[in-house]
Amino acid sequence: MYRTVKTKPARSAAPPLARASANIFAALANKTKYVDPALAQRWPELAGEKLASLSRPGRITGQPRDKTLEIHVATGAAAAVIQSEADALRKRINAYLGPRSVARLAIRQSGRHAERAGATPKSAPAGRDDDSPLGDALRSFRSAVKRRGPEK
């Protein structure tokens, strides 16, 4: 006669890396105010030199036919200038992104000077992180992956 041995049920597999890292990348996007890199690169052309020196593009939010582009400015005076040029700016952005891509512009006063959109950011040497929010988020992500252990 055979004796049946009860064992513990098998453990479920680890979650996919995409699901495990989704929260970390969502936090990273919120910290860095995610923006389309192509839009940021062409911002001086789209906004004009005057407006580009006062502002920087932010993230695009909303439904497919009702999207809002966040524009970050440093001061209230810069916000007033952007607001006065909002209709023309929205038309130029829609000409670049496609018809009716952006329905509204939301001007956000961030208190920091707008970064020069045409300037390339200083990159840290290979293997070193900078002290920006992006560097902090990347260090957090690396430590989370190391804690998780190697994939089998």
Image (tube, helix red, strand yellow):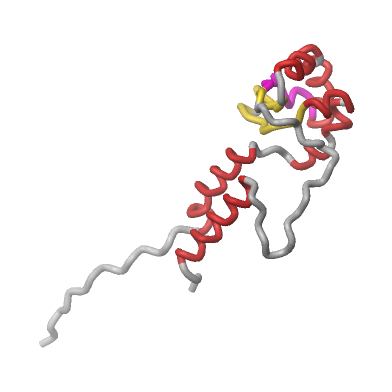
In this rendering, position of residue 97 left or right of residue 107:
right
Q: Would residue 95 be seen by someone viewing this image from the given angle?
A: no
Q: Is residue 99 found inside the magenta-colored segment of the image? A: yes
Q: Residue at x 87, y 24 (%)?
A: 50
The residue at the point 52 percent across, 58 percent down is: 17
Q: Position of residue 96 (x, y in %)?
A: 83, 30
Q: Which residues are magenta?
A: 98-107
100 vs 26, nearest the viewer: 26
Give the vertical position of 7 relative to 27 (above or below): below
Q: Picture quarter containing residue 47?
A: top right
Any magenta on residue 133?
no
- Residue 114 percent across, percent down from the top left: 75, 31
Coordinates of residue 78 in the picture (x, y in percent): 76, 19
Q: Give the main secondary structure of the magenta stretch.
A: loop
Q: Is residue 30 above or below residue 88?
A: below
Residue 27 is left or right of residue 116, and the answer is: left
Say whether residue 49 is left or right of residue 144. Answer: right
